């Protein structure tokens, strides 16, 4: 019984650490996405064109939707 409870506690600590890492990764990717999105929007305002960046903007928007589903 003692060994099982120690294993359970070790598993819980591992799960908590994995959850923290996953949350940190999600935060990091959201920040990167927001920075990229802002960069693209500023360029669009500056140049008044979306033609050259349109595909990239769509890709970034699709990636963001995928990240939000995680």
Image: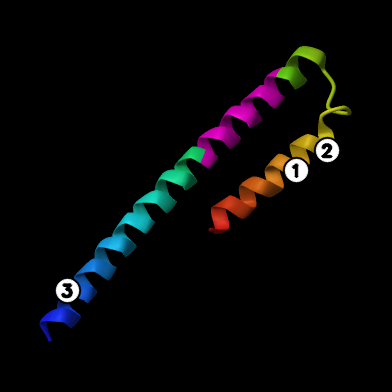
Between circles 3 and 2, the one closer to the viewer is: 3
Tell me the SS state at disc 1.
helix
Image vertical order of residue 66 relative to residue 54, above or below: below
The tag on residue 22 is none
Give residue 35's quadrant in the image: top right
Residue found at x 28% / y 69%: 11
Residue 30 on the magenta segment: yes
The tag on residue 55 is 2
Q: Earlier in the sequence, mark 1 or mark 3?
A: 3
Residue 65 x, y percent position in the rendering: 63, 51
The answer to the question of whether label 2 and label 1 lie on touching residues, with beta carbons closer than 8 A, is yes
Image vertical order of residue 15 relative to residue 53, above or below: below
* Residue denoted by label 1: 59
* Residue denoted by label 3: 6
CA gap, disc 2 to disc 1?
Answer: 6 Å
Left or right side of 18 for 32: right
Q: Which stretch is magenta?
A: 29-42
Residue 66 x, y percent position in the rendering: 63, 54
Residue found at x 23% / y 67%: 10
């Amino acid at each position: 019984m003692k060994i099982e409870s120690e294993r359970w506690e070790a598993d819980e600590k591992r799960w908590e650490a994995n959850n923290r890492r996953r949350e940190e990764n999600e935060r990091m990717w959201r920040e990167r996405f927001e920075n990229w999105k802002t960069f693209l929007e500023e360029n669009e305002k500056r140049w008044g064109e979306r033609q050259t960046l349109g595909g990239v903007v769509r890709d970034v928007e699709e990636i963001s939707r995928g990240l939000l589903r995680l």
